[in-house]
Image (tube, helix red, strand yellow):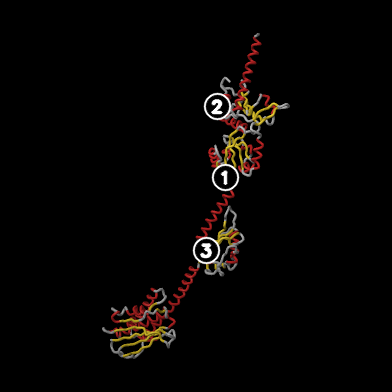
Amino acid sequence: MTSSLLLQKDVLIADLRRKLAEAEETMRAIRENEVDALVMRGPLADEIFTIGGEQESYRTFMEVMEPGAAALDGAGRVLYANSTLTRLLGRSLAELQGKPLAESLNGNAGTEIARLLRDASDTARTREIHLSRKGEAELHFIAVAAPLQLGTTSGHAVTFTDVTERVLNESAEQSEHAARAVIASANEAVLVCDRNGIITHANAAAGIAYDGNPIGKVFAEIIPLVFRDSTGVLQADDMIAMVIGGTPLRGIEATAPKAPRVKDYLVSAAPLRIAGDRISGAVVTMVDLSQRKAAEKQQNLLMRELDHRVKNTLALVVSISARTASNTDTVEAFQKAFSGRIQALAATHTLLLDNAWSSLELQDIVMSEVAPYVEAAADQVTIEGLNVAVTPRAAIAFGLVVHELTTNAVKYGALSQPGGRVTVRAIGRDSGNDGAFVLEWRESGGPQVAPPDRKGFGHAVIARSLQYSPGGGAEFDFDPSGVVCRISIPPEDLN
Amino acid sequence: MTPVKSPRKLILYVAGQTPKSLAAIANLERICAEELPGQYTVEVIDLRKDPKLARQHGIVAIPTLVRELPIPLRKLIGDLSDTGKVLVNLKITDGA
């Protein structure tokens, strides 16, 4: 054999060895499931055969499935994804194929899918997944992974069922419950209107503004509002329209003429935004202003009353001054008599102030007037049955009368000497004088009494003070054993 | 000075989008990028589109990776998931 023949033989053997090794490697690869397609030599041309059947069948099946679906290999790479899933993920099939599905999902969703595949090595597993896409609302899925054998490949089938709507509905339902609870807990009347001004929600407190079930009724029709200072231009329907237009109204005083219980309100209204920027209605709150209004009215009344009283008092002071001057001979006498009478007036005023100018009892007035002149009033002055309340008008007049009687008694009568006594007691209602309340001032134990030569201002005060009404007045009886004065309090001034 | 060598070519034969084909493409891309940067360019030939191209390298099983140069020609059958095995066949030593 020539050396050239030997070389050819070596080359041939080496080539055969390489081919044998290649054939063995191919057999090993097929046996060990490392290939899933073979090239077959056909009569006309080579053909490709897929081991484990054609893929078209399972792909067609996946396409008709309603949920998003993907077939993954053992490493979690996408072999195929149906069009529902590519649409949900916003990726093309080419972008997804061959890449791990977990990497194609944003944020937590990728981690969740990786966990799901790990858990589903033997059996199907389920996990809830949230998917956020740029500029769009979050999507919610129920992902199910189950082991899958595709030809020679072991992997997973994964489906994604979109439950976004259900989750949103549940969330909306919870929000609705919360909103209802908030509205129900509010002390103020709260009414919610839709864009047409029709009431959709109202709390129990709304009963002060409308007697009945307001749901489904037009707000402006069942609760017409008259806004102060708006000269009738703004009405309830305009208010709702303004709010739905995006302008909130805060704290406007309004009257609700048709409201069953409370008429005066502080009304606020705000646009209702349930989702996004769209205004879906208006929330109206109505705060009861009746107590505040009543307080304002009381204040105005008191201001007018005070003005009236100050004028009356000043007129009375001028009158007392003039009459005292005409009945006194010296400046000292004038000063004493005048200041005594002004103090009597002040004492009654003090009592009235303590009782907030409401009413006083006659016994308190007597005590107040007598106290400055008698050290131990209880010993010399007795009061019986005078726990009778009278108006401020009668209190002031009666106070002046008692003051004059007391000063007379101190100067000339029972209180001018030890052992003298004064009894002030109720006689009762006078049937002949419109039911006036009659009481008696009776002195005893003092010097003998004789009628006075001239009637001073004190006498005039006593006789006239209560004559502002036909039922009122006072009469003297100069009994030698002691002065007796019968005083009538006009019936309309008894409380 | 080390001469700049032009990248050598690897040919990966696949059959459409069978699971092993997709896995082989993904594995090869990863290995080239992570372990052999700049050393190879990869051509993927889909035999489903043109089956006669299989004859050029006598391809029987798919997927198969072929390294033509440096000689000897090497074939790696399978989805290339065994990185160590791939590297043994593709590592270019100084002498290669």
N-term-proximal mark, 1 vs 3: 1
Q: Residue A422's spot in the image, x, y percent?
A: 31, 84
Looking at this view, name the residue that lies furthest to the top: A1
Helix, strand or loop for disc 2 = helix
Residue ID at (45%, 75%): A305
Helix, strand or loop for disc 3 = helix
Observer-side mark, 1 or 3, equals 1
Residue A13 versus residue A290 in the image, above or below? above
Cα distance between the residues tagged 3 and 2: 76 Å
Cα distance between the residues tagged 1 and 3: 41 Å
Helix, strand or loop for disc 1 = strand
Q: What label sits on residue B46 in the rendered view?
A: none
Q: Residue A282's spot in the image, x, y percent?
A: 57, 59
Q: Residue B61's spot in the image, x, y percent?
A: 64, 27
Query: Which image quarter is the C terminus of chain B in?
Result: top right
Task: Judge by depth and name the residue closer to the eye, B16 or A121.
Answer: A121
The amino acid type, in three-letter code, at marker 1 is: Ile
Q: What label sits on residue A142 in the rendered view?
A: 1
Disc 1 crowd, CA 10 A, few/some/many (<14, 14-19, 20+): some
The amino acid type, in three-letter code, at marker 3 is: Ala
Q: What residue does disc 2 label?
A: B84
Q: What residue does disc 3 label?
A: A204
Residue B96 versus residue A400 in the image, above or below? above
For mark 2, name the chain. B
For mark 1, name the chain. A
